Image (cartoon, rainbow, N blue to C red):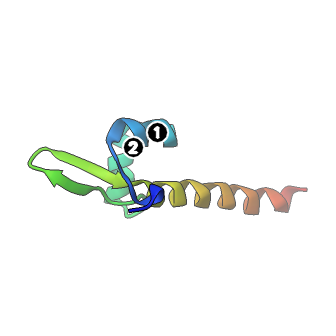
Amino acid sequence: MTVNSRIIRLPEVKNLTGISRSQIYELIKKDKFPKQINLGARAVGWVESEVQEWIQQRIADRDQNASGYL
């Protein structure tokens, strides 16, 4: 297992993304955020590298859109 494939829980996902629990689940429902994985009967987590990739894509989208305004 590499550092990027570690599983992170919801509080860390919220901290990394800056979005709320309800918004995370709404984005998942719309297939716009990485899906959680089941860790047990009442526990879920996210693959850190997938969340980081989602963040990087948001940055790339921003930069691509901003270049048209220069």
Q: Amino acid at mark 1?
A: Ile
* Disc 1 + disc 2, Cβ < 8 Å: yes
Q: Residue 27 bears which disc, if any? A: none
Say whether residue 4 is left or right of residue 25: right
Q: Secondary structure at mark 1?
A: loop
Residue 19 appears at what percent x and percent y?
A: 46, 39
Question: Does 1 sit above or below residue 55?
Answer: below
Which residue bears the numbered disc 1?
19
3 and 63: which one is in front? 3
Q: Quadrant of residue 10?
A: top left
Disc 2: CA contacts within 10 A as few (<14), some (14-19) or many (>=20):
few
Q: Amino acid at mark 2?
A: Gln
Say whether residue 33 is left or right of residue 56: left
State the residue lying farthest toward the right: 70
Which residue bears the numbered disc 2?
23
Residue 23 appears at what percent x and percent y?
A: 39, 43
- The Cα–Cα distance between marks 1 and 2, rounded to whole angstroms, is 6 Å
Residue 43 appears at what percent x and percent y?
A: 18, 45
Q: Secondary structure at mark 2?
A: helix
Residue 13 appears at what percent x and percent y?
A: 41, 43
Q: What residue is rendered at 43% in x and 54% in y? A: 48
Q: What residue is rendered at 38% in x and 62% in y? A: 1
State the residue lying farthest toward the left: 41
Q: Quadrant of residue 37?
A: bottom left
Q: How many dots with numbers? A: 2
Quadrant position of the C terminus in the picture:
bottom right
Say whether residue 22 is left or right of residue 53: left
